[in-house]
Image (cartoon, rainbow, N blue to C red):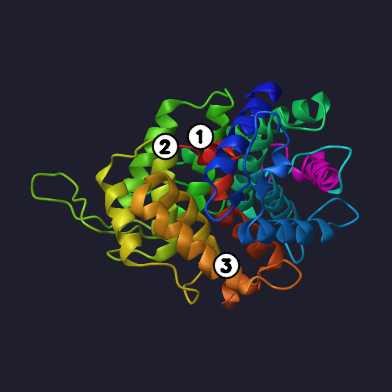
Amino acid sequence: MTVTMRRDFIGSMLAGAIATTGGSRLLAQTDNDADWSRLYVPDEVDNAVSEAVDYLVNRQGQNGSIADRQNEVAMTSLAIMAMASVGVQPDRQTDRGKAMTRAMEFVLKPDNQDANGYFGRRDRSQMYGHGIITLMLTEMLGMGIDVDQNVRMHKALEQAIGLILQAQKVKKRSSMQGGWRYAPDSTDSDLSVSIWQLMALRSANNDGMHVPGEAIDQAVSYLVQSSTAQRLPDGRISDAAAGFSYMPGSRSGTFAMTAAGLLAMQVCGRYESPVVTAAAKWLLEHPPRTNERFFFYGIYYYAQAMYQVGDTYADTARRLTSAILLKDQRGDGSWHGYRSEERNIGPIYTTALAVLSLSVRYHYLPIYQR
């Protein structure tokens, strides 16, 4: 997508967001009133994400990174994506825009990507980080501060996408084929790592980069293997409530993996698949709880995926996501993990995921559009 197309997209989405935002109030518009800032009164979600963005900007290091404990490149990329999801763009005029520009420059340092195109080695984020970084770059492509930054993004992406495609081709047993795991040469797969690679491929395809259709098809086959939906005697898959599991073969789904699997299928355009219907029903029956393992990771996928299902599913997810997150935001604008798995990663990670969860109303990032 070109810079002009992305700006047109954002402009049109702003009008849509203002018209459809949940709790925000609109003042009366007159024919002579073209100042949107006078029409839109921020509500508590708007205020929460604004405070969170300020928190992320204030945590930026001298080198441009936005990270606190580990995985600097991956965490910075997650922070960039969170800020972009609520409309922050690189620029040279505003504090937020300058922070975005510096963060992009940090990620694009040549040393952060090895000769094979791999982002996950230097900051030790492995294929998790590689997928996050690649997805961020595909979403920001065309929105760089200048032509040079966009050219460098495209060059980095060509190698990064190539590595994802090569990693998918590693020979694995049939139930694992089509997915990804921790290392580019892993001989097994898990859903958690795979969804980041898959979203990066879909976003790259949206940018006009070459992504073979069979790569997406193979990934979808792996996703279906990870669904716990019942197989009927005639070979069809039941659409009765059923989740997704971390690896194929499990009979029970988890909140985080079911939300991730649902979004992954939707990103691939499989909206009518019975495993999508089954997962949406499962999530309606198993709402988010803060004592879930990897709660922030899960609610990010949950908020985005249930929005795409629409109707009662979207309304329920919007209400529950806001109710939980707004209640527990800290005074400095951050969120902290409820359990040790996420608490130990640090508040940059949890705050970025909280912002992405609340950003559904804004529709800024193309990857999350139906």
Image position, residue 360 (x, y; %): 54, 49
Residue at left offset 33%, top offset 41%: 221
Residue at left offset 49%, top offset 41%: 198
Q: Where is mark 2, residue-wise?
A: 268
Vertical position of residue 296 compared to residue 63: above or below: below
Vertical position of residue 32 compared to residue 86: above or below: above
Task: From the viewer's perspective, tell me whether residue 342 is left or right of residue 35.
Answer: left
Residue at left offset 72%, top offset 56%: 50
Residue 172 can be seen in this image:
no
Q: Residues within 10 Å of mark 1 (few under 14, many from 20)?
A: many
Q: Which residues are magenta?
A: 96-122
Q: Residue furthest right?
A: 62
The label number, if any, that marks residue 329 in the structure image = none
Q: Nearer the viewer, mark 3 or mark 2?
A: 3
The kind of residue on which mark 3 rests is Leu
Among numbered discs 1 and 2, the one appearing first in the sequence = 1
Between residue 183 and residue 52, name the one nearer to us: 52
> On the rendered image, what quadrant is the C terminus found in?
top left
The label number, if any, that marks residue 325 in the structure image = 3
Q: Secondary structure at mark 1?
A: helix
